Each structure stands twice: as structure tokens, then as C-alpha cells.
Image: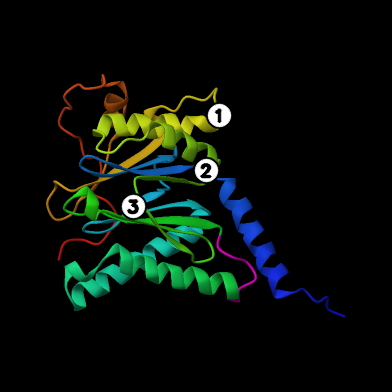
């Protein structure tokens, strides 16, 4: 004879399961800086990216199970490609993409036995900081409009508190990167993150057309060692991203 489980208890069990899975991963930090939006992940892998390009001005960051958020990323790229081709590239927005992800995650959470163990950020850089858009999506399809900074995955509460203490508006790239890295280190006071343990990318509003770029390990190391207030050298580009090509 099957046991009866109330819908409330079933939803609670699913939510607890997803939260535990997400907390086992390593954290990702997203924050605004003077030229756009910075993404920093505690991720030593050079093959499995947590941060990726989706479209011209849009990037994606995720924590949790890689195969699950990679499926979502690929779906987002297809959505952006199709809408940009059928209508106009300007019609592809972070808001629209966040709504699509929210519907998918909400359906998976309510209609399947196992929810996705993922948390996502969809960000779009604007012509100015006031026009930047950062949307955070949780495993159940909930959407939050974030401003300034956020942390997800791992000990996100500790990282968020450290970000709150260190963050300031209009930080130069080098200083913003140091803030992000020191905040990630708040999870373990004895751990020091080096460039080879980080995945770093930006949406730079001053670039043309495709604004996403990854920062090479050498560039990240140089930024972390740069003296506060020093003039920044020319940025090195490791990769233009995995999003849709120019059409």
C-alpha cells in the first residue's frame, strides 16, 4: 500500500534536496564594476565552465550539477539564436531569457521527482551601470532582480556577507576582482585562491558587438597583484565565449 505524502511535504523535500546539492559546489560571485559586470568562479577546471556567453550583451553563470546547468545553457543559446534571427538581435534580452529559464525550472521542480540542483544568473550589460540587468534564478523557477553584487553556491551566506563589507559602486576591474576573490576566500580562512583556481570573465560595455570575454590566467594574476589605484594595462583576451556567432 503506497504511503501518502502531502504536496507541502513533497515540495519541501524537493527544495531541501536541491539546496543541499547546490551547497556542495563551489561558489560563484557576480558584481558590477566601472566598465560592466564581472563574473568570478572558484573553478580550477579549464574544461567545465561555470561562466559562459549567451548572446551579444548577455552572459550566464551557474552553480550545481554541471550536466543540468549545461543543458540549460545550451537551451538559452538556441533561444537567443532563434529569436535574434527571426526578429532582431536587440529583441534578445536577459529578461526574456530569465523568463524562459524560470518556466523550465518551475516545470521541472513541480512535475518531476528530482528537481534540478542548480542556481543561475543571467546578466545583460547596458549602456550605463543603471541599465545593467542581473537576474538570479533558483531551482524552483523563482526569479530575483539583483543589483550590485551576489554570491551563489557553496557557503553563499558567508561570501555574500564579505561582499557586502567590501563592495563599492564604480570599482575598477582590478579592485573589483580582488573584492570578489577575497569574498570567496571567506568560506575558508586558511585558503588562498590563485589565478589558476579561478574562472573569470566580464561583460565589458565598451567593447563592440559581442561584449563577453574571458580573462586569461596571466591577466587574472596581473590584476590580483596590481597596486590599488595603478593604471591598468591592456586586457588580454583568452576566449570570446561559447555563445552564438555573429550573423
The secondary structure making up most of the magenta span is loop
Q: In the picture, which quadrant includes the C terminus?
A: bottom left
Q: Which residues are magenta?
A: 111-116
Q: Position of residue 23 (x, y in %)?
A: 58, 47
Q: Position of residue 35 (x, y in %)?
A: 20, 42
Tell me where residue 230 sits by quadrant: top left
**Residue 217 visible, this angle:** no
N-term mark: 3 or 1: 3
Q: Is residue 232 magenta?
A: no
N-term mark: 2 or 3: 3
Tell me where residue 180 sits by quadrant: top left
* Residue with the mark numbered 2: 156
Question: Is residue 149 or residue 194 the one in the foreground?
Answer: 149
Residue 128, above or below 189? below
Residue drawn 18% across the image and 48% down it? 205
* Residue with the mark numbered 1: 188
239 to the left or right of 5: left
Residue density around tag 1, few if under 14, some if 14–19, many if 20 or more, within 10 Å = few
85 to the left or right of 14: left
Q: Residue furthest right?
A: 1
220 to the left or right of 23: left
* Residue with the mark numbered 3: 52
Amino acid at each position: 500500500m503506497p504511503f501518502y505524502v502531502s504536496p507541502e511535504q513533497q515540495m519541501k523535500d524537493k527544495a531541501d534536496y536541491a539546496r543541499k546539492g547546490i551547497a556542495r559546489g563551489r561558489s560563484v560571485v557576480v558584481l558590477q564594476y566601472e566598465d560592466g559586470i564581472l563574473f568570478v568562479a572558484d573553478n580550477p577546471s579549464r574544461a567545465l565552465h561555470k561562466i559562459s556567453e549567451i548572446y551579444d550583451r548577455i552572459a550566464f553563470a551557474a552553480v550545481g550539477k554541471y550536466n543540468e546547468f549545461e543543458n540549460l545553457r545550451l537551451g538559452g543559446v538556441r533561444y537567443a539564436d532563434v529569436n535574434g534571427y527571426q526578429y532582431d538581435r536587440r529583441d534578445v534580452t536577459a529578461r526574456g531569457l530569465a523568463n524562459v529559464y524560470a518556466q523550465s525550472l518551475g516545470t521541472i521542480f513541480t512535475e518531476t521527482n528530482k528537481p534540478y540542483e542548480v542556481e543561475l544568473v543571467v546578466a545583460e550589460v547596458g549602456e550605463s551601470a543603471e541599465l545593467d540587468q542581473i537576474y538570479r534564478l533558483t531551482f524552483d523557477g523563482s526569479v530575483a532582480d539583483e543589483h550590485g553584487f551576489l554570491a551563489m553556491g557553496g557557503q553563499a551566506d558567508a561570501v555574500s556577507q564579505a561582499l557586502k563589507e567590501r563592495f563599492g559602486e564604480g570599482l575598477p576591474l582590478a579592485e573589483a576582482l580582488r573584492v570578489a576573490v577575497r569574498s570567496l576566500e571567506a568560506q575558508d580562512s586558511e585558503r588562498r585562491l590563485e589565478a589558476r583556481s579561478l574562472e573569470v570573465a566580464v561583460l565589458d560595455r565598451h567593447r563592440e558587438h559581442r561584449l563577453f570575454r574571458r580573462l586569461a590566467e596571466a591577466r587574472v594574476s596581473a590584476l590580483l597583484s596590481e597596486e590599488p589605484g595603478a593604471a591598468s594595462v591592456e586586457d588580454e583576451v583568452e576566449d570570446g565565449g561559447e555563445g552564438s556567432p555573429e550573423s
